[in-house]
Amino acid sequence: MLILPAMLSVLAGTLASCIIAILPGLHVYNVMGLAVMMIYGAQEAGAAIGSELVLPFMIGLVCGWSMLNTIPSVLLGAPDESAIFTVLPGQKYLMSGRGHEGVMIIGVGGLAGVVLLLLVVGPLAPKFLPVAHYVLMRHMHWILWVIITFILMTEWPKGGNLGPSGWSKFFDAWKGLGAGLLTFFLSAWLGFILLYRSPVSIDVAFQNIMPAFVGLFAVPWCLLNMVSGVQVPEQRVGSSLGITPDVILRSAAAGGLGGGFAAFFPVVTGGVGGLLAGHATAQRDERVFMMSQGVSKMVYYTGALLLFFAPGLHLTRGGGAWIIKGLYEPQGRGDYFLALGCIAISGGLSFLLLSPLSRFMLWMMGRVDYRKISAAALLIIVLMVYAVTGWAGLFIMVVGSGIGLIPVLFGSRRLNCLGILLLPIACNMSGFGNKVAAWLGLL
């Protein structure tokens, strides 16, 4: 494989991620799916696009987006579910005029995630993870059920202080919990429909779940931003982040644990991994909390892609790996070292771009109402869904949006929207998915 084309391609992917990342709600997997359709179209037209261009570009796209998506996560309340824990402390920084500082703290966590992938996961994955996968593969189903149980159990009743009577206080306390359970099971129902009776054309079946995810996570937050009356205070750029090596090490441990768990186990996403790691490590420091989510997001998205290239493993986890698998199968250690090199280049470059892009976004927010930015992002999202999946995809997006608005309006966790994946896959892995589908009238 030629080195220069690969380097230019990973640089192009990283620079392209700058545009994708700063738009709230625009997910990298959606863009990858659109890129795959363009590649297929070029191949049908007789143009040959080699793997030395496609693979580095895709890796640069994912790695760069994992770092730079921090900007809208903090400054615009981006709806990506893996940022579910960075939104609240990040918004706290934003509303105190320290949004840029919040972005950079999470970005340092992302850079720590890159170092973790290169120095720890890179050397150890080909040797130890194939053995771990062989041992655990027969136990994946019950592990997934334990995770589902933990997610539902930790949606604890909130409130309970409103109303004159005991029953009114009871309903006030369980309003958020009920909304969370309703969100989980409605999204799971939608997941079964898409798995067994999807209206999306078979030609774009690899993007079957995309319009639902856009509706569940992206559209509700764009709509909320558009109708919100919150005024963002004037922002200032500090000279120091106030982080120490101890903070970085604790963040890397917590975030690496959560992101690594999510990258290795099927269906588990970065948000779920972050939830589990947060409870397992019980980190109280706000900076550790934010940085660990930067680590977790980088390790989840980019690490899952790296495991796809790991010799002896070739684990297909995450949407990026599934999309690339339709184009190319890894050929050995050469591809693995290529992936490591691309991660090093893209991770370093995207971190250097993080500060100027954050400042640019703050400058833009000072001149353009963030409601208009959210409206423009929503228009781009809708057009992309239509371009990839047509009217059927738009219908699925609308249905997903209705479900995704429930946790936003009633104050429950948006993580419950992941029932769209967790419950159908858990049922299928346990061997009774078809029975549930038949009970739902889908067979």
Image (cartoon, rainbow, N blue to C red):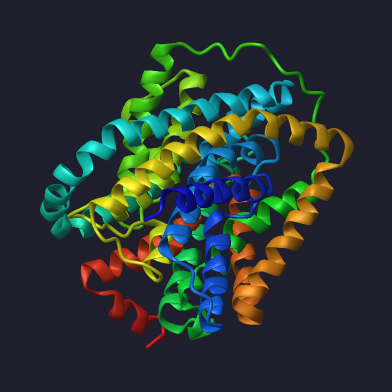
At 81% from the left and 32% from the top, the residue drawn is 363
Q: Is residue 302 left or right of residue 215?
A: left
Return the residue nearer the eye: 111 or 27: 111
Q: Could you tell me if residue 240 is visible in this image? A: yes
Q: x and y percent of residue 269 in the render?
A: 41, 50
Does the image show residue 310?
no
| Side of 356 relative to 278 (left or right) | right
Number of residue marks: 0
The residue at the point 40 percent across, 49 percent down is 152
Residue 35 image position (x, y, % from top left): 56, 66
Which image quadrant for residue 31? bottom right
| Residue 176 or residue 267, whichever sits in front | 267
Q: x and y percent of residue 98 in the render?
A: 69, 21
Q: Residue at x 56, y 37 (%)?
A: 350
> Measured along the vertical axis of the image, is residue 441 above or below residue 125?
below
Q: Position of residue 57 (x, y in %)?
A: 50, 54
- State the residue lying farthest toward the right: 367
Towards the viewer: 15 or 376: 15
Q: Residue at x 42, y 28 (%)?
A: 112
Q: Nearer the viewer, residue 369 or 417?
A: 369
Answer above or below: position of 70 versus 7: above
Left-right relation of 162 to 116:
right
Q: Quadrant of the C terminus?
A: bottom left
Q: Where's the N terminus, which quadrant?
A: bottom left
Where on the picture, by quarter, is residue 118? Answer: top left
